[in-house]
Image (cartoon, helix red, strand yellow):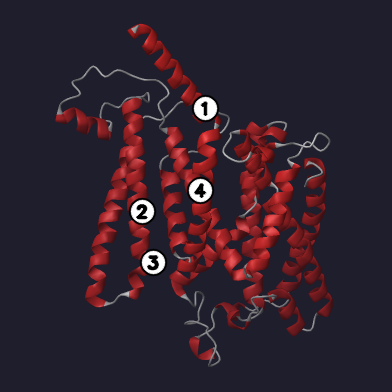
Amino acid sequence: MAWGVRKSSTLNTVFTTFNLLTVGTVIVSGLFFVKISNWNISKSEIPSGVDGGNGGFAPFGWSGIIAGAARCFYGFIGFESISTTGEETKNPKKTIPLAIVLTLVFVTSAYSVVASVLTLMWPYYDQDPNAPFPVIYENLGLPVIKYMVTCGAVFALFTSLLGCLFPIPRILYAMSCDGLLFEFLSKVNERTKTPVIATMLCGVGAGILSSIFNLEQLVDMTSIGTLISYLIVCVCLLVLRYKDTKTAIQDIDSNSEDYKMYKCFSLFNSKVTNTNTQYISRVLIIVYTFSASVFCICMVNIDCYEGAYQFPLMILIGVSITVSLLSMFMLHRLPQAVENLAFRVPFVPFIPCVSITLNLYLMMELSVKTWIRFGVGLVLGIIIYVFYGVHHSLEGSKQRTLKNEENKNTLKISS
């Protein structure tokens, strides 16, 4: 990766080719051993002493599916790295959105097909979580395919490593250029045109973390970090879509109570954003995020209570749903910023709001220890921002310069 984007892309293409061949081998060979009955195993067929749930198509229920999705969300890490290559792409306005959509489609399809073949080939309760496919092929008496899949897994590790470490140095580079991180992270090698120091630092940091934590802890930490980053993207999308692009002056009496209600629900049907609509939108975004968080917490913990103890949670769920829907409706009534962009997210605010809720729900399914580890990392980031980023950020410097000029002008006028 430190050699440049072209060499990284070529190497990634080679590894991805081997990955696709491995996936194709698994799918084709697995079709000869598929048993539909493995998706409908009754509870009585599960051996004693084995945690196999209740059997059937979803043996651990809806909560098990959500918990598994939250933990395995790390499988989608890497597609967001496409958006970090805007400065290195010939036509980023068109190719980046298209590449993101196609990547998500292909990755989701590959995961779904491989997972289906895996559970149809062998009973789910007898799977080896550390090496499922090699163990299955060994049990089926196919040693050749077993070694092929094992070699493919090694290439998959390289691809995953490239996908994870490719965007991080560029993010650090951008933050360093903005003054939020240390200046040496923005140094670019003259020959390779890449942030070599940031790349090396990311690789060393990843190696240290992998030597400290086990696989399960790393997966959970990666998942919660990814989910929170996607949550922040959705919130930022709403903030930017309703930002003030042209200040408008209202001719109606702003002191009346009717005016305040009309503003909230945008019954004036204003087509242009202004300071009022921007302020209201940000309040509504905060209200929606808070109510969605309450809803997700209640839904995750409702199975822990029985009988009358569920009643308060049911009330909170009803109130949070009502507040969330009302906030979404009020956001829908507000005018959106009109900008000439090549790609705009459709169905705003519906899609971002649903994405916020889903991300929150998946995050709530993660363990408390995962939240604690994330909190420690967040505190470290806040410390760096408070003691370095605030004092060196370019935006902060601009604000301080403007403030100093205003003070000078004020002194001149007063004198």
Identify residue for label 4: 383
Identify residue for label 2: 292
Q: Is residue 339 visible?
A: no
Figure quadrant of residue 90: top right
Q: Nearer the viewer, mark 3 or mark 4?
A: 4
Figure quadrant of residue 316: bottom left
View extreme (bottom): residue: 48
Mark 1 residue element: helix
Mark 4 residue element: helix
Work out how far the residue at label 1 is from the one at label 3, CA to CA, in angstroms. Answer: 44 Å
Work out how far the residue at label 4 is from the one at label 1, CA to CA, in angstroms. Answer: 19 Å
Q: Is residue 399 visible?
A: yes
Quick one: label 1 or label 2, which is nearer the N terminus? 2
Figure quadrant of residue 21: bottom right
In the picture shown, does residue 348 fall above or below 272? Answer: below
x and y percentages locating residue 131 in the rendered image: 70, 75
Q: Amino acid at mark 2?
A: Ala
Q: Amino acid at mark 4?
A: Ile
Identify residue for label 1: 397
x and y percentages locating residue 188 in the rendered image: 75, 36
Identify residue for label 3: 300
Quick one: label 4 or label 1, which is nearer the N terminus? 4
Tell me what residue is drawn at x 45 percent, y 67 percent.
Answer: 368
Q: Amino acid at mark 3?
A: Val
